[in-house]
Structure formats: structure tokens, C-alpha cells
Image: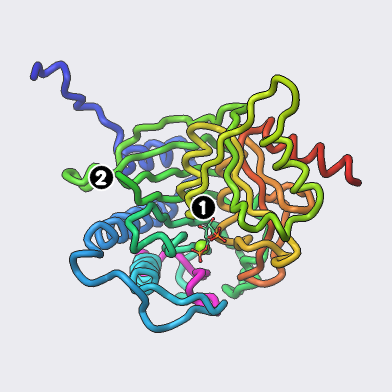
Amino acid sequence: VGTENINTEIITLTRFLTEEQTKHKEATGDFTLLCHALQFAFKSIAYYIRRSTLINLTGLAGSSNTTGDDQKKLDVIGNDIFIAAMRSCARVRVLVSEEEEECIVFPAGPNARYAVVCDPIDGSSNLDAGVSVGTIFGVYLLGEDAAGTKEDLLKPGSELVASGFTMYGASAQLVITMRGGGVNGFTLDNALGEFILTHPEMRIPKTRAIYSVNEGNSLYWEEPVKEYVNSLKYPGEGGKPYSARYIGSMVADAYRTLLYGGIFAYPADKKSPKGKLRILYECAPMGLVFENAGGQAIDSNMKRMLDVVPEHIHDRSGIFMGSWDEVQKVVDIHKKHG
Ligand code: AHM
Ligand code: MG
């Protein structure tokens, strides 16, 4: 191997964050430290997922979470890892996790100015089959007068300062975006133990003939959703039907959609009138990623996902997100139905 093939100027997440921090004169370094704690949580979760079959971490923990989902052992471990990381960095005041009924409040401190939302292991029904799952996160900056309660988190996604996700697939892929910024993708190099910038300035293709939805729910769909999906499958004279891709892990379906384009949907329907996915730690963080990559994310009322304000921390919403043109087709069909 010639030395010219060795890249000695790789951009690690640590370097990326340091460079971002120096771009912002007003930055205190608190956000950077918070991100370091986040990346440690991702690395740990990735490590346990990879080893789960070997160290008896498959299967149920024997408990259920707030909404009655059976918890997997890894759901419990992922949640504990995430909480410990957020507590120990001393930059977080309030944490909402899918696995915790109430929000977790950490001690007040001069630097604990952030609120974090997370789904530690999303798509955990896929875990025991070795199929990709992910962690979703969002970060809010608390106001000076914030009391440090869950009310501080009942805000629209447009107020997120950063969000993203890590997919634990063939490799661990971290995607992060900041408000008003671009979307950057990193790959975990297991040997170095570092996330390396491999997908700078990600842009979602404007259009692509791929749809991703649990079609087993079509019996319960509202008319416009049925019509929309049918229009993809039966495009009429000379048209080519769309390809279907559905993993059942939002993070994995979202990551593919971000790279290849197309649309991911989990609409509200007659069985789940509020949808399935959670606003605070699933829909809003994804909304910011998709918008910042040049796509769209909307709810089942055709409202911008980032403008939806949850009333409760675990509230759900329907969601359509993906390539700009693909999501627009959903909007147009809904408009027609009035
Ligand atoms: P979870 O948070 O309990 O893992 O559920 C969320 C997951 C998403 O990752 C995925 O998009 C969806 O549920 C799949 O649901 P379904 O099995 O109804 O298609
Ligand atoms: Mg989830």
C-alpha cells in the first residue's frame, strides 16, 4: 500500500464539533461536551447490540414501558446507558426517553442548560433478528427562566438546536444536524473508536420512486392515504410503479430514504387516530434532519412536522417524510379531498 492511500486528515466527530464550536464566537463549549456524551452513548449501545446474541442480551426484560410495550433487555440497557451519559456530562437539565413515563430532571447547575429527548433503541422488535435499529435524539436549549420541568419540552421541533440519529446496521452511522445548518453523516470506525465524517452535507434526492410504509395497515387508512399509495402502485398508462421498502425500524427506513430518496410514512389511521410514532423523540428530530437535507416532513393533517406542538411528552403523530417532490404528492392528494 502506497502511503498516498492513507488519509491522515480524516475528520472525526470530535474534530468536526471543535470546528463547529470555533465558528460560533458565543459558544461556551457546553453543547460540544453534550455531544461528546451523546457519542459515547451511541458507541456503547452499538457495542452491546453487536454482542447481544453472545452475551444473553436477546429477548424480553420481563417489564413493559409507559405505553405498555414489552421492553427488550436491550431497551433497558440502552435507556440506562443514555441516562448515565446525559447525567454525567452535567450539561443536561431535563431528559425525556421513550422508556420513561416521566421526564428525568437532573440537578440544576450553571452549565445544565439543555433538554434532551431520545428514543434509546428504536425499532427494538427487530433486535433479535439482527436487523438494524437506531437511537433518535433531539436537543433543546432551555430559556434563562426555565423551571426544568417537562413543560420546557412541550415545544415545536422548530426550536430544536440539534437532532439526529444513529443507525446500528452493518456499521454504526450517525447523522446529525443543527438548526439552520446542514446534515452530516459519520461512520463508526470500530478500531479507532471514532465516528468519521463519511457523508458531508447530505442532500436528499428531490424525487425517487421508493415508498416505505406498513401496508398491513391499509385496511385502516383514510381515503387520501389509500389513493396516494395506489397512485404509486398503479401509475396508469406507461407509468412505472414504485418499489416498496419497509424495514420496520424508523431509523433504518429514514437513513435509506435520506440517501436514496423516496418517502417514508406512518400515517394516522382508523386504528391509531393519532398515529404511532412519537412527536418529541421520533417525529420532530427526523423532521429537522429531513428539512435540513432539502426534503419535507409533515403530519397527517398536512402540517409541517416541525410546527407540531405536543401536549404531553409521549404524544404521537402521523408522519410523511422524504424527498421534497414525493411528500408534495401526499399534500396534493389530501388537498383534492379537502
Ligand atoms: P418502537 O419505538 O416501539 O420501537 O416503535 C417504533 C417503530 C419504528 O421504528 C417503526 O417505524 C415502527 O415502529 C414500525 O411499526 P410497525 O411494526 O407498526 O410497522
Ligand atoms: Mg421508538
Looking at the picture, how far across and down is residue 101, in whole percent? 54, 79
Kindly identify the amino acid type of the residue bearing the numbered disc 1. Met
**Residue lying farthest to the bottom in this orientation:** 62
Q: Residue at x 63, y 63 (%)?
A: 276
Relative to residue 61, is residue 152 depicted above or below? above
- At numbered mark 2, what does the secondary structure look like: helix, strand or loop? strand
Task: Provide the residue span drawn in magenta.
Answer: 87-103
Looking at the picture, how far across and down is residue 43, in whole percent? 29, 55
Query: Assess mark 1: CB under 8 A from ligand 1?
Result: yes
Kindly identify the amino acid type of the residue bearing the numbered disc 2. Glu
Query: Assess mark 2: CB under 8 A from ligand 1?
Result: no
Residue 194 is marked as 2
Residue 250 is marked as 1
Q: Residue at x 33, y 73 (%)?
A: 59
Quadrant of res 267: bottom right
Looking at the picture, how far across and down is residue 245, in whole percent? 52, 42
Q: Residue at x 72, y 29 (%)?
A: 235
| Nearer to us in this view, 160 or 307 | 307
- Give the image's coloring scheme: rainbow
